[in-house]
Amino acid sequence: MHEIWEQANSIFNAVKLDNSIIYKGVKIVKDDQGIRIYSTETDFYTDMTYSFVVGTFEESLKNYLKNKYMRKLTAIENSIQKEINGKRNHKRYNYLKKLRETYLTKYNEVNTKKVTRR
């Protein structure tokens, strides 16, 4: 776990606080009991320490982000289908299309080495 802390601490874009590091929706907290890893995806942070231990920090983060973006894309696709088949609200439909494009860009960024957005 200390290797994961050091790897996360060496990332330039990570936000470093007193005893925690936040990077791409993942918060790593170091305290007296050890190191804990949380997902900041919702208002209540979920502990994902044990699923994050496999491999390096970058590999675990990449795997987590792939799964997160696929869940988001699936939910957006379902919402688009509901708009097309039901309400037919064009503003909402256009919003969902832009949101889908945003998450596709993020997903592709995780799957490739090249950064596609800033």
Image (cartoon, helix red, strand yellow):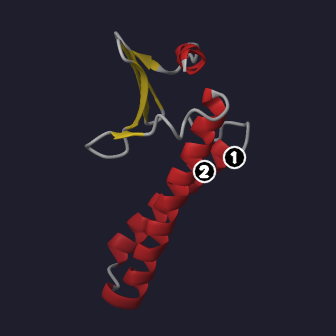
Q: Is residue 80 above or below residue 69?
A: below
Q: Secondary structure at mark 1?
A: helix
Q: Secondary structure at mark 2?
A: helix
Q: Is residue 7 above or below residue 66?
A: above
Q: Residue at x 73, y 43 (%)?
A: 112
In three-dimensional space, the C-alpha distance between marks 1 and 2, rounded to whole angstroms, equals 6 Å
Most foreground residue, 106 or 71? 71
Query: Crowdedness of circle 2 by 10 Å Cα count: few (<14), some, many (20+)?
Result: some
Q: Which residue is mark 2?
A: 107
Q: Amino acid at mark 1?
A: Asn
Q: Residue at x 50, y 51 (%)?
A: 68
Q: Amino acid at mark 2?
A: Tyr
Residue 22 image point, x, y percent: 42, 25
Q: Which residue is mark 1?
A: 111
Q: Residue furthest bottom?
A: 85
Relative side of 35 to 46, left or right:
right
**Tag 1 and tag 2, C-beta contact below 8 Å:** yes
Q: Residue at x 54, y 36 (%)?
A: 52
Q: Quadrant of the C terminus?
A: top right
Residue 107 image point, x, y percent: 60, 50
